[in-house]
Image: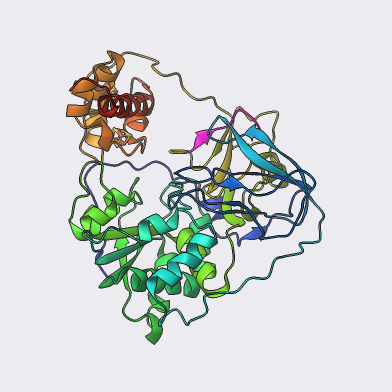
Amino acid sequence: MFRSLGFRGGIHPPKYKNPTADSPIEVLPPPAKVIIPVLQHTGPCASILVKRGDRVRLGQLIAEPSSPDSAAVHSSVSGVVLSVANFPHPLGAHVLAAEIENDGQDLAVETAGIDTPWKEAAPQEIVRKIFSCGVVGMGGTGVPAQVNLLPPANNPVDTVIVDCTGCEPFAVADLRLVKEHTDEILTGALIVRKILGAKRAIVVADSSAADVASSLSDACKDEKFHDLSVALVRPKYPQSDEKILVRTLTKREIPSGGTPADAGCAVHNAATILAIARSVLSGTPLYQRTLTAGGPCVSTPKNLLVRLGTPVRNVLEFCGTDLQRTKKVVMGGPMRGSAQAELDAPVLKTTYGVFAFDTLVPGVRNYNCIGCGRCTRACPMRLSPAYLMRFTDKNNVIDAQHWGVADCIECGSCAYVCPAKINLVHFMKLGKYRVKNAAASRAAPGAAA
Ligand code: SF4
Ligand code: SF4
């Protein structure tokens, strides 16, 4: 086991994990109706295959990947398709989705793992199975799993990192997964290492989560997992970000605009690794996920196994949420998640938490910057958020780009420490958007050289 490792910058927000840390994962009863969007991943939308009136089974493919960087979408219930139309999406837009009435019977499609034992199978065969099961990055990124499992030939991966830190406040579901499904997660780590031909696989836990770390190190004493390593990182946010994990564990830097593969690494979180293992071993499509439901307005916070497409309202009501007192509902984590305008928004493959708060989102800029420099000290990417804010505010794209706005990982550490209560993440997102747009305009046919 590694000694406990850390990184420069970052913050120590209260963890708020106690209410659910010892709560086993419970099954949320499937809802009467699910709304399953064709976009639950980065990359292009999946292409819908069903229409109004179709009968579908649990786990049936209802939208196929439209490109190699898209992801398959499966039904999370058996029943009848009520409509295929645009529905509210957790990211704010309206997105094409299948609305399916649950017949309550859970009539499932037959599934099977890959034909060959995974240790003997060709990497392409294993990746095809994962692709067909619609696995994406479940820690919030939504990157289709196959994208990170087939890196370019000129970027060989020698290190697989499995993130079991669950570093966001309130979010406990991944930690429960590690404790309750340790063997499957470690098997997933070996499968990913085999696919990538990597020399080593490191499973990372937070040094303050002693029970998780000991579950992992005890399991690794078993001969079948003996060549996996367990590393401990010091409790600090955002230690689970892939750029931070790669730097902390390997001392390598992911280049600006690059991916972990550019540093010879692949990073997956525990939930993704579990979904990969289940797709390969039993052909189970990704139609449900675990999440933590909590926050100040939730009377009985829980870790739940939830069918994808379940309205967030069902999750909150199941946990006794005081919706009268609730002023803000966040899907994802409180630091990086997105506030919801509608309680009908569905749980997606990327939803690792649902939280209800009794305070509103602060304004974009409550007071003027006082130049204290706290944001710079907190930034784990070594950026100068106050400068980047000013450049973005003045639409100075050239300086925003030069000072590295594109490297911002949107962790929110700067905004958390800012005494002027400036929503710096808003400016970082806007700056990144403008830099990307400017690059696209320059690259457009007919653009001035
Ligand atoms: S500038 Fe970006 S990376 Fe740095 S602390 Fe702020 S949100 Fe995090
Ligand atoms: S922390 Fe806030 S007030 Fe201090 S320099 Fe950064 S933006 Fe300005």
Is residue 56 a member of the stretch shown in magenta? no
- Looking at the picture, tell me which residue is in the foreground, 402 or 216: 402
Residue at 38% x, 80% y is 225
Q: How many marks?
A: 0
- Looking at the picture, tell me which residue is in the foreground, 281 or 233: 281
Q: Work out which quarter of the rendered image holds the N terminus and state it.
A: bottom left
Give the residue at the far front of this rendering: 446
The image shows residue 95 at horizontal and vertical percentages of 59, 35
Among the 4 quarters of the image, the one containing residue 151: bottom left
Q: Main secondary structure of the magenta part?
A: loop
Residue at 39% x, 67% y is 213
- Looking at the picture, tell me which residue is in the foreground, 192 or 109: 109
Among the 4 quarters of the image, the one containing residue 96: top right
Give the residue at the far bottom of this rendering: 223
Horizontal side of residue 310 vs 393, given as left or right: right
The image shows residue 430 at horizontal and vertical percentages of 36, 24
The image shows residue 198 at horizontal and vertical percentages of 28, 70
Task: Magenta stretch: give its range.
Answer: 337-343
